[in-house]
Amino acid sequence: MVSTTRRLKVLVSAYACHPEQGSEPGVGWNWLKEIARHHDVWLLTEAQRFAPATESAIQTDPQLRDAVKVIGVPRERRAERWLKALAYYHTYEKWQRAALARARELHRQVGFDVVHQLNMIGYREPGFLGSLDVPFVWGPIGGFAQMPWRYLHAMGTSGAVSLGLRNVANEMQMRLSQRVRTAMQASDVLIAATSVDRVAIAKLYGRQAPVVHETGTAPDPEPIVRTIAQGEPLRVLWCGRMVPSKAVGVAVRAVARASRTIPIEFHLCGDGPQQPFARALAQQLGIDGLCHFHGQVPRVAVIDRMRSSHVLLFPSLKEATSATVPEALATGLPVLCHDTCGHGDIVTEEVGVGVPVTDPPRSVEAFAEALVSLSREPERLRACSIAAAQGAPRLAWSAKGDAADAWYREAIESRQSRVNRVSAG
């Protein structure tokens, strides 16, 4: 039995880790902070982009300074200058091999209790740390979700082509990658980022993986209970990078349909290649006067916009768990989303509406009906808002450290049981 009080020596590979960035770097940083509450951490991260800022932030935090050691591993990117995206995974795999070499040196010096492959969370690159003779944790793991084929035609020509090709490549890699299969079998504990990923891991690799979403939030100390007065416009918010998988076109069409029935304002925060498409679609549908495109704005401005909105419309169809959704719920903002990906796991009927993934016309109709319903039923809007804020603590970052602590001790016991079985046999 592993002591539940002893601080373990943990090697964490978080390729992307940055205290002032979102997405994967923010995931790495927030997990690191929470893991360090329980254990002593040696962090492997990219030397050029992430190690300096992470080290600087750690040195200014007394609680982290004595608990975390940052080991920057350089990434050679010369090939990417010429081959761009074609070379990305090649140079990333080389970084993972260099991280393994550094990990072996560290293990000889430190003697780690457990190793954790944290991010990037995509399953395609599992790293090589599972080859160390140390209890091995991998996850949260994402990337198995496919873009629903019926929605491709709503993504514009370039979006349909890129996402269709991605679906084909993803299906092949899920089934054929021997490195992924080897890492799955070498892991003492696996964690899935979403229920879609959990099902895929069980189906393809025969392993059970609990769902723990890779993102979290800090509960808002003063969440706002949303109410709406008769005749007041419903203030709808969309946030994210405007890429095809975020389905911003579905959101614009839903707002257009709802606007035939209720007064509405639509605020869009974010930039990206589909912004011209979204603007043109709004103009085509005659709602460009209702749509306010704010472009890329600082996170603090996004939170302010959440606090002044009535509902978040988030129809994304392919990702793990966007930080946007838990952050919105923490402010008491109800969420309308597709019943898929990580947001499909956390948005219940108490806090919003999950729309089934069928086809674009039915999605548009369902989102529009939900917008009209919340506008006309202020008590329902109020109830969803209260439930969103009350449920926020389960999405808090602080819960991640507790979860990781349990994984590590489970991994140690699992590895010891495996050794005992081999010895007995």
Image (cartoon, helix red, strand yellow):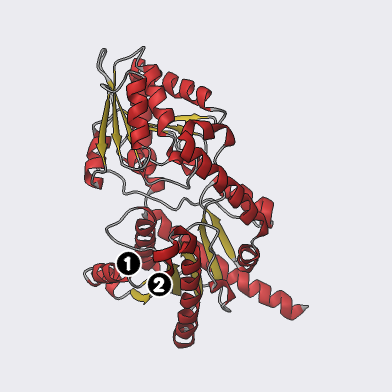
Q: Are marks 1 and 2 in contact (CB under 8 Å)?
A: yes
Separation of residues labelled 1 and 2 (CA atoms): 9 Å
Q: Nearer the viewer, residue 322 or 223?
A: 322
Q: Is residue 171 left or right of residue 281?
A: right
**Residue 204 % position (x, y):** 67, 54
**What residue appears at the point 34 percent right and 43 percent down from the top-left corner?**
272
**What residue appears at the point 49 percent right and 52 percent down from the top-left corner?**
212
Residue extending farthest to the bottom is: 109
**What residue appears at the point 51 percent right and 75 percent down from the top-left corner?**
97
At label 2, the amino acid type is Arg
Q: Nearer the viewer, residue 224 or 23?
A: 23
**Residue 213 % position (x, y):** 47, 50
The label number, if any, that marks residue 49 in the structure image = 1
Q: Which residue is mark 2?
A: 75
Q: Residues within 10 Å of mark 1 (few under 14, many from 20)?
A: some
Labels 1 and 2: the sequence-earlier one = 1
Q: Splitting the image into 4 quarters, where does residue 398 fall?
A: bottom left
